[in-house]
Image (cartoon, rainbow, N blue to C red):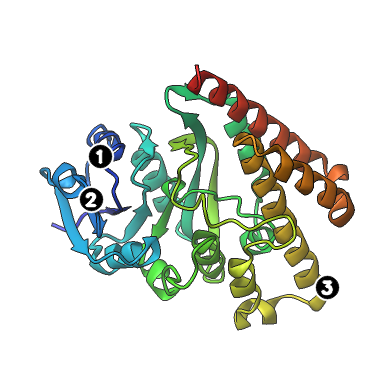
Amino acid sequence: MTPSISVVIAAHNAERFLWETLASLQRQRFTDFETIVVDDGSTDRTRLIANRPHCRVVSITRSGVSTARNTGLALAKAPAILFLDSDDVLEADALTSLWQGLITQPHAIAVIGQHLKFWNNEIEDPKMAILRGRMMPENDSLKFLLRRNFIVNGGTILIRTDAARNSGGFDPRLRLGEDWDFWCRLALKGSFCILRDKVVLHYRQRSDGAQSGLRGNPLKLNDEAILSVFSHPDIRSRFSWTELWLSRRFARQDIFWSEARVHMLRKNWGLLFAYVSIGLVQWPETFFQFQHLTRYYHGTKNALKALRLENK
């Protein structure tokens, strides 16, 4: 029998947290789904942990998260697909909420829920999910995605499988921002439905995350995803030169300040000072964007609180 949802988990040396991710799937009230774990060349107990009933495990040589996700996409049997990270945790009614959103909005190619960040046993203020939901666009998903990756995490978005395949999947050439690049190509195919007040995912924050060493520096951002997105011919043909220029500037600005916050959380004070100094000159408009400053402030405050608890 064909399932309604395929959940794809790309996992590389994920033994520390994978069991918790899989446990959150076992707790789902919605049961009409399949789980595909793509073991991306792990050298720990990832495959052993994933080898459980109702979970299909596929092993590939170490190829990166994009290839692993694309492998799962090719194997998916369901009409809808969700790409869940191997260290995140779904709410018990996550698949129910996302599936209901998708079937009640036949025009939408994807439905997006909200997330809460967490560090070990500390979770951020639930008001943050409401704030993020309010900031998501009512329509014109692509227009706003070009400026900022408001989806953030694949575990919050349920996608029609045909649309994911027709969009070309994830680009394995990108080391950073491959998800944002995919969301933008996906948005070319149709609109997204937003569940503004529904938290579906707890998004784990880690200083040793897979992309922690791929970021740039205050003088040279890692902007390979920006180059990919803004060179796409269908995107270039849909917007004017001025719109593309402004969107690209906003996207670079968002990456810049996200990197600054990462260095603050790691207590790299010298680099943080460099980011702030250069940012004041290069991105002065940031300090007049109230929504951006509010989101940045609350996110940073919650992260610092969790970091203090973690280090006790």
- Measure the alpha-carbon separation of dots 1 and 2: 9 Å
Using the image as rendered, state which of residue 18 and residue 131 is in the foreground.
Answer: 18
**Picture disc at residue 237:** none
Q: Badges 1 and 3: C-beta atoms under 8 Å apart?
A: no
Instruction: Name the residue: 50% across, 39% down.
Output: 207
Using the image as rendered, state which of residue 288 and residue 139 is in the foreground.
Answer: 288
Instruction: Name the residue: 52% across, 71% down.
Output: 189
- Measure the alpha-carbon separation of dots 3 and 2: 44 Å
- The label nearer to you, 1 versus 3, is 1
Using the image as rendered, state which of residue 277 and residue 204 is in the foreground.
Answer: 277
Q: Mark 3 or mark 2: name the one nearer the start of the chain.
A: 2
Residue 150 drawn above or below residue 308: below
Quadrant position of the N terminus in the picture: bottom left
Residue 304 is drawn in which quadrant? top right
At numbered mark 3, what does the secondary structure look like: helix, strand or loop?
helix
Picture coordinates of residue 180, whole percent (x, y): 55, 60
Picture coordinates of residue 236, whole percent (x, y): 68, 79
Task: Tell me if mark 3 has few (under 14), some (14-19) or many (20+) residues whose alpha carbon lies within 10 angstroms of its own.
Answer: few
At numbered mark 1, what does the secondary structure look like: helix, strand or loop?
helix
**Picture disc at residue 35:** 2
